[in-house]
Image (cartoon, rainbow, N blue to C red):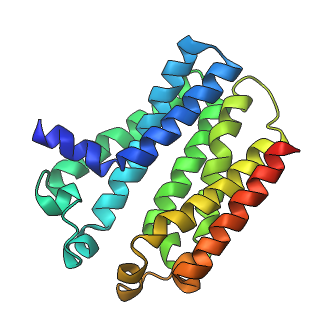
Amino acid sequence: MLKFRGLIQASHFGPTLIVTAIAFGFGTYYWWEGPAYVIAFTVACGQLVVGWSNDLYDYKDDLAHNRTNKPLVSGLITPQYLMKWLAFMVPFSFIINLLGPLGIKGGLVYMLGIACGVAYNFYFKFSALSPLPYAIAFAALPSSIAISKEINPPLWMWLGGALFGMAAHFINVIKDMEQDQKSGIQGLPQRFGTRNSIIAAIALITAGMLILLK
C-alpha cells in the first residue's frame, strides 16, 4: 500500500488529475462517455511517464534540498522500484494510446506531447526555451482528441492550449524558484525571477482567455 501511494505521489497527482479530467471532458465532447473513460485512462498512463521520469531525474536535487514531500526522498519507494514501473509504462502507454479511441493519428499527436514532457525533464528545464515543451504538450492534448474524429483542431484549441501550457510552466516553477536557481536550473522562469514570472503567467492566461472568447 505504501509503494502504491509512492507511485501516485511520484506521478505528480494533482497535474495528472487535471490533465486526465481535461481529456475526459474533450472525450465526452467529441465522442461520448464510454470512449471518454478509455481516453482518460490512456492519457493518464502517458502522464505517469512524465511524472515518474521527472521524479527519477530530480532525485539527487530533491535530496540536496531535502524535499521530503517527494516519495523517493521520503523513502516510500526506491529509484529502482520506480524505474521498473517506468520501464513498463513507457511502451504500455504508447501502445494503448495508439490502439485506443485516439487511433494512430490522435495517439501519435498525444504521445508527441508526452515526448515533450520527458524532453523538458531531461533538457528543456535548463534552457531559455523551457516553455516550448509545455506549449506543444498542452496544444497536443485536446488536438489529439479532435484529430481522432478526423477534425482539424481549431485555432482556439491549439493556440489556447499552448498559451495556457506556458502559463502553467511559469506558475509551476514559482514555488521552487530559489532552490532551482541555487541548483543551476536556468529555464526561462528562473531567468525571469518570481515577480516577472507571475506577470508572464498572468499575460499568457489573459491571452489564452481572449483566444477562447473569440
> Looking at the image, can residue 103 be seen?
no
Image coordinates for residue 89, horizontal then vertical, percent: 35, 39
Image coordinates for residue 79, horizontal then vertical, percent: 18, 57
Q: Measured along the vertical axis of the image, is residue 149 above or below residue 147? A: above
Left or right: residue 29 compared with residue 156:
left
Q: Quadrant of the N terminus?
A: top left
What residue is shown at x 32% (from left), y 65% (from top)? 57
> Looking at the image, can residue 172 be seen?
yes
Q: Quadrant of the C terminus?
A: top right
Image coordinates for residue 118, horizontal then vertical, percent: 46, 57
Between residues 35 and 174, which one lies in front from this camera angle?
174
What residue is shown at x 41% (from left), y 70% (from top)? 175
Between residues 131 and 46, which one lies in front from this camera angle?
131
Q: Residue 80: which quarter of the image?
A: bottom left
Image coordinates for residue 62, horizontal then vertical, percent: 25, 71
Left or right: residue 45 compared with residue 153:
left
What residue is shown at x 82% (from left), y 50% (from top)? 211
